Each structure stands twice: as C-alpha cells, then as structure tokens.
Image (spheres, grey):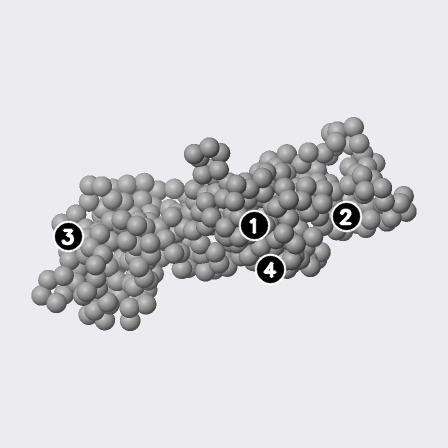
C-alpha cells in the first residue's frame, strides 16, 4: 500500500506550459481519475509519475521517496497504455511474464505469478494464444496482467478503454474497478470520458489547460461544481447555461434575461442585495428542468418553443428556444409528454437545482437553495 504525492508539478516546452504548478495527493489504495479534455495535461502528469518525462519543476513522491531523479525502472510503477503495447510474437503467458523475466525472477516464481494473475483476470484459457488471436477485451486483460504481475506500488492507466466498442467499455470499466479493489494498488487513471470517471473513481481531479480545476468525489464534482468549466464537463446531457444580469430595484432582486425581469423571492434575494457580481450565469441540468402545466411551482419560469427533440432510449431530450439567442435542453424519461416541435411551452427552473456562476471568472457563486 503506497501513497502518491505530486507537489507543484510544472512541465514546459519552451514558452508552452503543459502543466502549471499542479499538486495532488493520492491516498494508499485509492482509485484516482484525472479527467479533462484532450491537451489539458493529464497524460503528461502520468508520464512524469512514471519517469517517461522529466518535470520542469516540482516534486513527485512515491511513498516517502522523492523519485524525480530515479529512472523509470526504479520507480516501481506499472503503466497500461491506450494501445496495449503487447509483443505480437509472444504468447499471452510470455507477455505477462516479461517484466519478471527482465528482473531475472526464478522460473517457479514466474510461473506461479503468471498463473495467479491469469486466474484473477479469468484468462487462463488464453495463455497459449498470441495477441492476434485475441479480442480487444482479451488484449486489455493481458495488458492489465502484465502490469500487475510484479506487484507494483502504483498502477498508471492512460485511456486504456478508448479502443474498445461502447458495450465492451462499459463492461471493462466495471471489471477494472473490481480488480483494483481486489489488489488494492494505488491507481491513477487518465480519461476524457466523464462517464468512465464517474463510474470508476474514488476521487476525480478535473483538469483544464494544465491546471487542477477541482478535486472531489464523483458526487461532489457533479453536485457542487466549483466553476462553470467543471459544471459543463461533468454530466450528460451537458448543463444548461443562461447568461443574465443581476438587477436590484426597490429592494427587490431580479435576473434580467433578454429584457425580461425574473423576480427572486425575498428568502433568496437577500443574498444578493450587496452583490458585486452583476453578470450572472444560471446553470441547471437538463434532468432538473420542469415542463410546467400548473401554477404551483417554486422556481424561475420561462416561456419558449420546442425546436428539436432527440430520442435516447430511456429518455427524450428536447431543446426549448428561449428568446432569440438562448435555448434550454430538457431531459425527460417519459415519452407521454407532448414534445411536438413548434409547441409553445413553459419551463421551470427549480430554485434548489440552480447553480450560479460569475460570468466573467466562471467561478461558482452558490446554489440558490444555499441562500435559504
């Protein structure tokens, strides 16, 4: 069981800053996911941990040992790559055994470890095959076995499921999570897929442009995003954003959207009386938007027209055009609702589901029910 700590890590290529003062602490046995768009620096973090890249600045500790100056072979980490990197001329047995042979382990120890790992991964029947005879999921298991066979202190995984089809990805992410719990190896997993991150992680580190934007459990990241970037990156369908202006008149507080004033109740508006933020972005997830058919509703009300619908199996997504420049996406599980394109509808944004962000900085201000 090994703790991993990254302190103020930076990686520059000339004037290009791929990582900028990145710090992260990963507890022993934890499954940490680095999540972010392509080019945000997450793979660079992984390669710096492995020793495949030299950091421009900062420190990396594996356990209590500073490993910056150690070569990759002495860091006792194992890495699974996106393309698996199996040796095509070797059998599955020899691919898994290769790290132990390089360490000159005894034949008996190698055989015991290979068969133990093969049994753990349920690939014992594949040991005599070569990679060309395997499916994508089977190759993934072999790559995992080769990484696990020497019992590393840290397990690094770089988008290992990206080459699999959608159904197999869902299956394999559950299998990898179950495997990690069994072996209890500290794991850092890189992905741009928020569904993978939400379903697998103990904690998620959301990255953007070489910076750590938020660290937390999947539930914290989803329910309490610290900024608009995190809110937009987590959740499917993506969160709705409406840019408004905060207006105070005669001790009453309004959100102004395209000339329409939306009054806030006194229990909430008192939070904004002395606000310095006048440009506000309202965020609400599509599943939380309500199609109104009565007057009893505690939230913001908007009128619009259904402009697009999309059937996604268990639920339907409808785009409701609000004014000339805004639309709100609504996700509903029932197909009994009339979502005819062109229909005029009223949509409701419940106060307790609305997130507010400073439009200029993107930083989260509060969830409206926090003002109660």
- Cα separation, mark 2 vs mark 1, equals 25 Å
Residue 145 horizontal/vertical position (percent): 74, 44
Q: Which residue is mark 1?
A: 59
Residue 47 horizontal/vertical position (percent): 59, 41
Between disc 1 and disc 3, the foreground one is 1
Q: Is residue 121 visible?
A: no
Q: Quadrant of the N terminus?
A: bottom right
Between disc 4 and disc 3, the foreground one is 4
Residues at circles 1 and 4 in contact by the CB criterion of under 8 Å: no
**Of helix, strand and loop, which one carries label 3?**
strand
**Of helix, strand and loop, which one carries label 2?**
loop
Quadrant assignment, res 133: top right
Lower position in the chain sequence, tag 2 or tag 1: 1
Picture layout, residue 101 above or below residue 222: above
- Cα separation, mark 1 vs mark 4, equals 16 Å
Q: Which residue is mark 3?
A: 260
Q: Which residue is mark 4?
A: 27
Mark drawn on residue 150: 2
Badge 1: few (under 14), some or many (20 or more) residues near its Cα, within 10 Å?
Answer: some
- Cα separation, mark 3 vs mark 2, equals 65 Å
Lower position in the chain sequence, tag 4 or tag 2: 4
The residue lying at 14 percent from left, 65 percent from top is 252
């Amino acid at each position: 069981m090994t703790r991993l700590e990254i302190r103020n890590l930076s990686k520059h290529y000339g004037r290009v800053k791929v990582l900028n003062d990145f710090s992260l602490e990963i507890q022993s046995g934890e499954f940490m996911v680095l999540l972010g768009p392509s080019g945000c620096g997450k793979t660079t973090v992984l390669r710096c941990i492995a020793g495949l890249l030299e950091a421009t600045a900062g420190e990396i500790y594996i356990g209590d040992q500073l490993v910056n100056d150690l070569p990759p072979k002495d860091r006792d980490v194992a890495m699974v790559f996106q393309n698996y990197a199996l040796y095509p001329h070797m059998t599955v047995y020899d691919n898994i055994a290769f790290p132990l042979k390089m360490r000159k382990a005894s034949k008996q120890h190698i055989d015991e470890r290979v068969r133990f790992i093969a049994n753990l991964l349920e690939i014992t029947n594949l040991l005599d095959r070569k990679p060309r005879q395997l499916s994508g999921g089977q190759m993934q298991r072999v790559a995992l076995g080769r990484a696990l066979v020497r019992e590393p202190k840290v397990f690094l995984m770089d988008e290992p499921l990206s080459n699999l089809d959608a159904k197999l990805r869902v299956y394999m992410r559950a299998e990898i999570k179950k495997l990690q719990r069994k072996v209890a190896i500290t794991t850092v997993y890189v992905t741009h897929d928020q569904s993978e991150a939400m379903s697998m992680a103990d904690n998620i580190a959301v990255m953007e442009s070489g910076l750590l934007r938020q660290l937390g459990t999947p539930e914290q990241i989803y329910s309490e995003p610290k900024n608009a970037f995190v809110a937009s990156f987590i959740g499917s369908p993506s969160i709705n954003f409406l840019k408004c202006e905060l207006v105070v008149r005669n001790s009453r507080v309004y959100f102004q959207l395209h000339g329409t004033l939306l009054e806030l109740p006194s229990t909430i508006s008192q939070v904004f009386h002395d606000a310095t933020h006048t440009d506000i972005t309202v965020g609400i997830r599509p599943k939380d938007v309500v199609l109104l058919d009565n007057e009893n509703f505690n939230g913001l009300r908007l009128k619009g027209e259904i402009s697009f619908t999309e059937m996604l199996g268990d639920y339907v997504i409808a785009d409701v055009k609000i004014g000339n420049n805004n639309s709100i996406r609504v996700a509903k599980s029932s197909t009994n609702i009339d979502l005819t394109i062109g229909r005029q509808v009223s949509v409701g944004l419940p106060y307790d589901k609305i997130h507010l962000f400073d439009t200029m900085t993107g930083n989260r201000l509060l969830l409206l029910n926090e003002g109660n």
